[in-house]
Amino acid sequence: GQQVMQIPQYQHVQEGEDFTTYCNSSTTLSNIQWYKQRPGGHPVFLIQLVKSGEVKKQKRLTFQFGEAKKNSSLHITATQTTDVGTYFCAGHRYGQNFVFGPGTRLSVLP
Amino acid sequence: EPEVTQTPSHQVTQMGQEVILRCVPISNHLYFYWYRQILGQKVEFLVSFYNNEISEKSEIFDDQFSVERPDGSNFTLKIRSTKLEDSAMYFCASSGGTGRAEAFFGQGTRLTVV
């Protein structure tokens, strides 16, 4: 079945440093979504990428969808303590429901 | 802002008992989902529901589980004969369209089986 992997599993950064998490699918995706889950909270939708090679930005967050539509990345510039949480990608294949990756847990040291 | 609501927020049950987790999806949404997250682990898909029937289910969603939309607003997950390993956070989500639309998650129900 479809597998979605993410690296790293954990990332500790100093406030102000950049952070990147990578998402890889075993199969070609129709679209990919990114969610953020704060400690003790529920997943909250961040963005959806649909097109091959697509890049989208939300303030300090940059999302990219690979040319082959099998991988994606989320980059945060100049992290803040409010960025703390687990970032999940969720890959969707045509006709199927999306599958979440295991997540990258980000901690930001002030 | 519309939101998905789940009740109860925390449920403690004895092993072997049946539990029903309740969800009220966003009113104009058509697709409903249940996910499970064991503490510290990833979010796992259980089942999706559309047009009053299951559209897809994972291998986790075996005969122990069932879903129902008993009326126009509620969406329930029933777990029969609970086991210790069923302890997890259960999230309900809804979306306006399948796959290409963002899913809105409820706050979750923490199920503890003792």
Image (spheres, coloured by chain):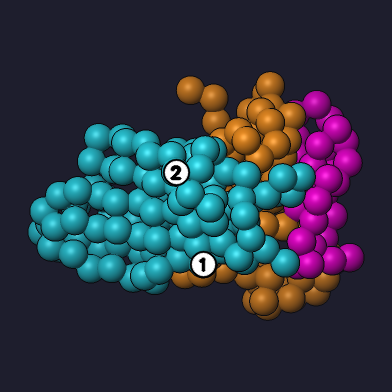
Chain colours: A cyan, B orange
Q: Hey, what amino acid is under mark 1?
A: Met
B95 up-or-down from A1: above or below: above
- Amino acid type, mark 2: Gly
| Residue found at x 47% / y 70% | B40
Residue B100: give x, y in percent of width and height: 62, 35
Name the disc covering residue A53, or none.
2
Q: Which of the two labelled residues, at mark 2 and mark 1, occupies the earlier sequence position?
A: 1
Q: Is residue B114 visible?
A: yes
Q: Is residue B6 visible?
A: no
Out of B105 and B8, give the one closest to the viewer.
B105
How far apart are the two marked residues, 2 and 1, measured between alpha carbons?
19 Å
| Res B111 → quadrant | bottom right
In the drawing, does residue A79 fall left or right of residue A84? left
Q: Tell which subunit mark 2 falls on.
A: A
Give the residues in magenta.
B47-76
| Mark number displayed over residue A104 | none
Is A29 included in the stretch rendered in magenta? no
Q: Which mark is residue A5?
A: 1
- Which image quarter is the C terminus of chain A in? bottom left
* Up/down of A10 relative to A25, above or below: below
- Mark 2: secondary structure: loop
Which image quarter holds the N terminus of chain A? bottom right
Name the residue at 86% across, 32% down. Answer: B51
Vertical side of A65 occupied by B57: above or below: below
**Callout 1 environment at 10 Å: few (<14), some (14 to 19), or many (20+)?**
many
Of residues B13 and A12, the one drawn nearer to the viewer in this rendering: A12
User: In the figure, residue A100 lies in which quadrant?
Assistant: bottom right
Q: Position of residue B9 (x, y in %)?
A: 56, 50
For the residue labelled by badge 1, is the local secondary structure a helix, a strand or a loop? strand
- Residue farthest toward the front in the current orientation of the protein: A67
Residue found 31% across the figure and 43% down from its top: A62
